[in-house]
Image (cartoon, helix red, strand yellow):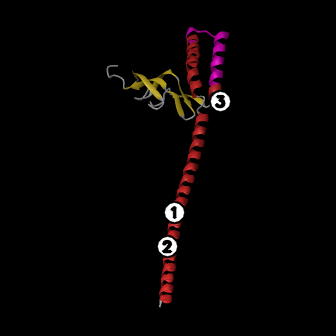
Amino acid sequence: MTERNDSSAAGDQVLNDLDALRANLQSAEQKRDEYLDLAQHTRADFENYQKRMQRDLVQERRFAQTPLAADLLPALDNLERATVAAEQAGEKGPLVQGVVMVQSQLLDILRRHGITRIEAQGQPFDPNLHQAVMQQPSADYPPMTVVHVLEQGYMIHDRVLRPARVAVSTVPDKAE
């Protein structure tokens, strides 16, 4: 009978060991699945990070000339003021032609780098593109229309580099 008890005990031990091995296997498979899921999420996060960094780098390169362009705009404004003053004085000599040529060259260089003027004259007022510095009663323009550009605005690609400073029309007084 002891042999039967020994074999029965040994069989129970084998079953217990088998159950323990199954539990360990199930636990190991569960951990494996968790680690696989974590690895997949980490890989996806890293790929998204790489894409975001690539996109940011492209944006940075696209707008890299913004500080230089912003620094050149006051000089370009002065060239425009000089040509307007020369026109008002009736000047048409070689000096005025040279200033106009330099202004045109600068505008062309800026245009090649994605910097363009904001066409504001006669356009509806847009606070994203224009900075209203005064209002002017006008019968010629509907209300909230740009009637005079005081300082040119510029875009760099699809962003405003500097808004146009403008005078905006209002409804004229009835007394006028």
- Give x and y (percent) for residue 155: 55, 30
Question: Mark 2 — residue?
Answer: 20
The answer to the question of whether label 1 and label 2 lie on touching residues, with beta carbons closer than 8 A, is no
Q: Amino acid at mark 3?
A: Arg
| Left/right of residue 89 with respect to residue 144 in the rendered view | right
Q: Amino acid at mark 2?
A: Ala
- Give x and y (percent) for residue 93: 65, 9
Q: Earlier in the sequence, mark 3 or mark 2?
A: 2
Alpha carbon distance from label 1 to label 2: 16 Å
Task: Give the camera-side residue of 174 and 64.
Answer: 64
Quarter of the figure with residue 97: top right
Q: Which residues are magenta?
A: 87-108
Question: Mark 1 — residue?
Answer: 31
Name the secondary structure under disc 2.
Answer: helix
- Give x and y (percent) for residue 152: 52, 23
**What's the residue at 44%, 28% (across, down)?**
145
Question: Mark 3 — residue?
Answer: 112
Q: Nearer the viewer, mark 1 or mark 2?
A: 2
Residue 139 can be seen in this image: no
Task: Give the camera-side residue of 164 and 7.
Answer: 7
- Give x and y (percent) for residue 105: 66, 22
**What's the residue at 63%, 17% (across, down)?**
100
